[in-house]
Structures are given as structure tokens and as C-alpha cells.
Image (cartoon, helix red, strand yellow):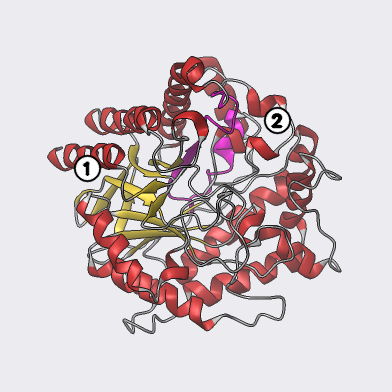
Amino acid sequence: MGGLPILAQPKLARTQRESPPMMNRRTLLTATAAVAATPALPAFARRTAPSGFVRREGTQFTLDGKPYRYVGTNLWYAAWIGHEGRLARELDALAADGVTNLRIAASAEHSPLKNSVRPAFHDQADEYNEALLTGLDHAMAEIGKRGMKAVLYLTNFWEWSGGMATYLLWTNGGRYIDAGDPAHPWPAFPEFVSEFYSSGEAVARYHAHIRKIVGRVNTVTGKPYAEDPAVMGWQLANEPRPGGTDATVDRTLPAFHAWIGETARLIKSLAPHHLVSTGGEGLKGSMERLGLVLSSQADDAIDYHTAHVWPGNWGWLDRTDMPATHARAVALSSEYVAQHVELAKQAGKPLVVEEFGYPRNGDVYDLDASTSMRDDLYGAIHAAVLASVREGGPLAGSNFWAWNGEGRAQHPDFRFRSGDTAFVGDPPHEPQGWYGVFDQDVSTRRIIRAQAEALAAL
């Protein structure tokens, strides 16, 4: 999840508001030509993973010789609750619903950016918060104990966990732009963050964090992270984008592609048995360019494609009139997923819809509000996964955004405040309860369980 909620954001740029471009033979050929024009990198040598590790074989995931398909969620805050009894309760609840895959944060940079989470993993002096590191250790131990898999992302394009903007301000004398600042309206923030890819010093600091985390030995299990089969894979970042405007993207693409290749290969050198993906949104993070979706994931060290679906943030759903625009929003979401299935087929790699979210009816945050419209979107995403699996296609799993579980908003205005510890799936920059699924959301959990059962039956 990233960017600013529409309620706090100026009118979105044209490319963020439009329906996705239609996929056809001509656009696929154009996209393929764009990838062919990307400078080739040497093939990445693969090693056969030991038992228990998820592998990529063509457009499929496998686990110990069998297809690996899953229902997953986003639990970004797992490390933050790692020392609490709540962690085990949340994992047990998810396991009971058939959730077997968790996408979690393995980074947070201490930052002056508004709404960036506290505590953070590390600060400008590279002093690390041992409680968070061991919280991550406990989380991975508990995930492994339940036979679940985790995907860990290693920084963030957006401000809510510090991220790339913080690496920049650490290395450029303290200059930064705060997301949502009226003095720097959209797309000033993504334009600023795109400077990260060409900053050798900022990228070096980020790579040092990767070595710290991927090279860590779990203090609970005694097992190196790189040898832990509970780790399905690592992601370069949450929602990395090459910029906020076409002109900037054209300028930053060489550095963006280089950053992807170099970072993916660094991770593979440290953890050769784990998968690597970019963590990108797909078309919406690629200026709607089909070729850019393919080229940004073309390196052989990138194992699979990812797509994120946010109809309420992209203008497909009018949140002031949800009943009138709901059917269109779900239809466009299904079309968007179908386009990414075709792109993954073209690339010959698996695909995961690893973020998708929808408001409660009426776009309110109160737990008493119905989730019937959200349930429709979940059903559509799950149907797309099932259809792809049945035909041997590349779409193998989904991670809904996000699991709130027993967490609850701590304030009447539903806003996160520094010092709050009752974390939910809605990050600090968003209303607490906007998109997350609570433990009491019976109908949504029923849909999640049904999907898990359907995948298991296949």
C-alpha cells in the first residue's frame, strides 16, 4: 500500500485516473519490443533449492515438487508485535482461515517524514533497534512453526516507513519533500523519491541494510535467514516507481533498471534459495506502460511479477457514491488483473496479486459498517486466481490488504498518532480501519476460507 489516500490528495494525474489500457496483440508486440530494446544482462545462475523452499519453474511456483498456490495477506507490522502474545493469536486466526502466506516489512528508516512509523529499524547513524530485529526473529519463528511462508520487503517507496526518501535525506544534506505537503503537491513526492535510484550513496546505505537483514541469524531459531524455508522470498521495496511524470520516468529508467538488477543479484548472492521480486504495483506504478511492466521485471534474478489493485484510490470507485460506481470498480479491477495475467504469460513468470483493498460500505471506518462491497472485490480477485490455476496460467496467489485482526483504532478520529502501539494493517498515514480486515468481519473471513478450500481442492 502506498501513496496518499484520495481524501488527502489533490486530483490525481490523468494516468492514475483512467481505466487500464486494453491488452491486445498489437500492444503486447509493442511491449515485447520495448523489452527487447532493454540492454541485456547476463543470465543469472540458479541453484536447486533444498526441500521446504518455494521454487519458480516457468510460470509456476512449486514446493517440494507440488504446485504452490495460496491465499495470503499483508501483515506489515509483524515485527512490531513480535514480542507480544498478540502475534501468535493473529497467526492462529489466519491459519484457521487457510491463509498461508504473509507479506511483511523488514525495514523502516527513522525519518522526519510526517506519519513515518515509530519505532524504526535503524537511524541515520545505522544504529539498529534490537527490539524490532528480535521482533522480526520471533515473527519468522512463529510463521515457520505454522508452516506458513513470508515475503519480506526491504524498503518502501512511500513515506510511512521512512523508505527511499529517508535514504536520500540521510545522504543529501537533509533535503526532502514530505508527502501531502500543500507546498509540494502531487507528484512532487514521487518525483523527489525517484532521485534515489541514481544516488550511489543512498543506494549503498540501502544495500547495507539488505546485507544486515538477509545475512542475519535468527536469535530465536538459530537459523540464518538465508537458510530459512519459511522465507518464500524478498522484495526490493514496497511499490517502487521510476517517477511521477512521463518526463521523469524517461530520464530515470536506466538508473531504475540498474537498481533492480543490481539489488536482485545482491539478494540472490546472499540467499540463493529464496525468490526475489520487485514489489511493484504493475501498470499503475509504470505510468500505464505495458513495456515498462515487462522491462522492470525482465532481469532473470526477478522470479515473478506482482500487481496491486486499489479501485478506491485510482478513481474507479467514487467513494462518495459507492453504490452507483461499485460494479464499474469491480469490473475494472478484474480487467486490470487479466491484463497482468497476459503480461506474466508474455514474460514466462508467475504472478501474484499481492495487494488489493476496498473500503467498507459508505467509506467509513466503523466496525459496524457492512463489508458487502469489499466482499465482492475479494470474490472477483479470488475468482481470477482460481481461473488461472485451472487453466495452468501464471496467477498463483493473492495477498489481501490487510489483516487488522484484533487491532483497533485508538482515537475517535481513526488517525494514527506517534506512540500508538495497537498496530493495524492500515499504515500510519491512513485512517485506521479504512481497508483492513478485522477479526470480527465474518463474511469476509468466510470468503477467504472458501478460497483456501477451493485452492486446496485443486
Q: Are marks 1 and 2 in contact (CB under 8 Å)?
A: no
The residue most toward the left is: 457
Q: What residue type is labelled 1?
A: Arg
Can residue 36 be seen at all in this image of the molecule? no
Which disc, if any, is residue 186?
A: none
Using the rendered view, name the quadrant where residue 399 is placed.
top left
Residue 118 coordinates in the image, percent (x, y): 60, 68
The image position of residue 121, as x and y in percent, is 57, 73
Tag 1 residue: 449
Q: What element carries label 1?
A: helix
In the rendered image, residue 86, in percent from the top left (x then y), is placed at: 34, 67
Magenta residues, start to end: 290-319
- Residue under numbered circle 2: 12
Q: Which residue type carries mark 2?
A: Leu
**Residue 91 falls left or right of residue 421:** left
- Closest to the observer, 368 or 262: 368
Secondary structure that dominates the magenta span: loop
Q: How many marks?
A: 2
Above or below for 38 versus 94: above
Comparing 72 with 25, the one in front is 72
Q: Say whether disc 1 or disc 2 marks the residue closer to the N-terminus.
A: 2
Circle 2 packing at 10 Å, graded few (<14), some (14-19), many (20+), is: some
In the image, residue 315 above or below residue 93: above
**Dot 1: within a 10 Å radius of its alpha carbon, few (fewer than 14), some, or many (20 or more) residues?**
some
